[in-house]
Every structure is written in structure tokens, then in C-alpha cells.
Amino acid sequence: MAKGKGPKGKKITLKTAKNSIRISFDGGRRLDLSKMGITTFPKCILKLADVDELDLSRNMLKKIPNSIEKFQKLRWLDLHSNQLEDLPKTVGTLQNLFYLNICNNKLTSKNLPEELNLLKNLRFLNLGLNCLDSIPPTLGALKELKELGLFDNLLTVIPNSVKRLPKLQKLNADRNPLPELVKKEEYVDPIKRIESLYLVQEKDLCCSCLKACQEERGKLKKFKNTVPCPSKKLSFPLLLTPNSTAVDNQEQWRLKDEHL
């Protein structure tokens, strides 16, 4: 039987684990062993490796064994709020995984396996509240990733390969010693740029400034050549809008009122 213990010294047995299986909202089988005071990964649950979701959050686990690779059907793995200092490389074999939460642990960059980049179907990854001072640029291989949590770490830079993930919708990097983030360059209508231009003679400009002005002028010319001419206003003489007659007679009505 497993060595893990729950509250009041209760052991996590195979029977206890089986009784902890729930049906998730989409019909999958979820093994929920959260908040049970487990200090050692219960080996007995390897006999339940056909579950779709595994929740070991809010325990006191310090290590996840390599045998986690036996959970090949796993789509959801929640390990947040433990005392994990590293992850096994075999986590990269869980190819069906789309949710991985390892927030609020003691993970360091040195012990964060690069094999995470093998999780090609991963949509959600939470690495917040750890001790990470860097993240591997190889996470840029997670092309399906939609949400990434990096908050409350020691990060000073986020690799461009990660920031530019094609499907990334949410990146939370709050409370890191990052330099001020440069906002994405907003599109500015070239016509509006005219307001910030000043007329000077070419002789008063250095070579670099002259080149920049020439480039701006080229962009404006190109823009003007691509702007379509305004089309003539369409006229419908036989079609009156509800208020058209009122507008035409408005002055006559006003005069009549003044004489009353």
C-alpha cells in the first residue's frame, strides 16, 4: 500500500483512491486527492493510471516520480500548492495533457525540465509562485498554449519565443523584477502623424534625421496613393426618409409658431 498519509494519519490506500474518483463535467474520470496531507506520492494510484484527470493539489509533496509517465491518458494534472522542488523529465511524455498547474511550489529554473516543450497539446500552464529566475526559450514550442502564468517569480526577462506564441491569449507575469514592459506599438493613422511633423530645411538635419524624414514622406505618399476616392453620395429622389419632410418644412413651422 502507499506510504502517503491523509489527515489524522489516514493512509492513501487503493480503496481510498478509487473512492476519490469523480466524473468531470465533460465525462472524464477525475482522481481527486487534493487537501489530504499527502507527503509522498502514493504508488497505489499507478493502478488507476487510466484516469483522465489527476488532482494532487494542496498537499505536501516534495517529489513526483518518473512513473508519472504511466498516466498516458492524462489531460489534466494539478500539482499546485505543494513543496515540489523539481519535476521529472518524464512529464514530457504526457502528450494528451492540455492543463498543467504547478503554481505555488519551490521550483527553480535549474530543475524545470526542458521536456515541458514536448507537451504539444498544452493549453494552460501555470508556473506562478515559484523560484524561477528564467524560463527556457524552448517553451516557445508550445504552439497551442493559450494561458501562461509566470507571476510571483524572480524573472528579469521573458523570451520572445514565449511572448510571441501564436495562440497565447493571457500572460500573467505580475510581481517579477522585470524591466518596464514595452507596450505593443499601436497603429497610428499616417494622416494623424502630420500633427507631429515640423517643417525644417534639409540643411538643418543630420544624415539620420534626414533619412527618417524621407522615409516618413515616402510612407505618406504611399498611403495617399492607396486611399480610395470618396464615392459620390447616392441620391434617391423618390425615397423620403421619415424625417425628411419635417426637415424641409421646419423653417415654415417655426415662423407659424412665432405668429400665433
Image (cartoon, helix red, strand yellow):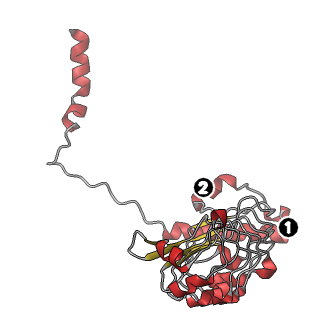
Q: Position of residue 134 (x, y in %)?
A: 79, 75
Asked which secondary structure carries label 2, the reply is helix
| Occupied quadrant, residue 46 | bottom right
For badge 1, the amino acid type reads: Cys
Above or below, 152 relative to 157: above
Q: Looking at the figure, which quarter contains the N terminus?
A: bottom right
| Occupied quadrant, residue 168 | bottom right
Q: Position of residue 76 (x, y in %)?
A: 53, 76
For badge 2, the amino acid type reads: Lys
Disc 2 to disc 1: CB gap under 8 Å: no
Using the image as rendered, state which of residue 12 and residue 244 is in the foreground: 12
| Occupied quadrant, residue 187 | bottom right
Residue drawn at x 35%, y 60% as measured from the top left? 231
Tell me which numbered mark, 2 or 1, is placed earlier along the sequence. Answer: 2
Task: Specify the farthest residue to the top.
Answer: 260
Q: Looking at the figure, which quarter contains the C terminus?
A: top left
Q: Position of residue 218 (x, y in %)?
A: 64, 71
Which residue is denoted by mark 1 in the rendering? 206
Above or below, 47 relative to 135: below
Which residue is denoted by mark 2 in the rendering? 192
Mark 1, other Cα within 10 Å: few <14 / some 14–19 / many ≥20 = few
Residue drawn at x 66%, y 75% as measured from the top left? 4
Asked if residue 39 shows in the view, the reply is: yes
Q: Position of residue 23 (x, y in %)?
A: 41, 72
Q: Is residue 253 left or right of residue 190?
A: left
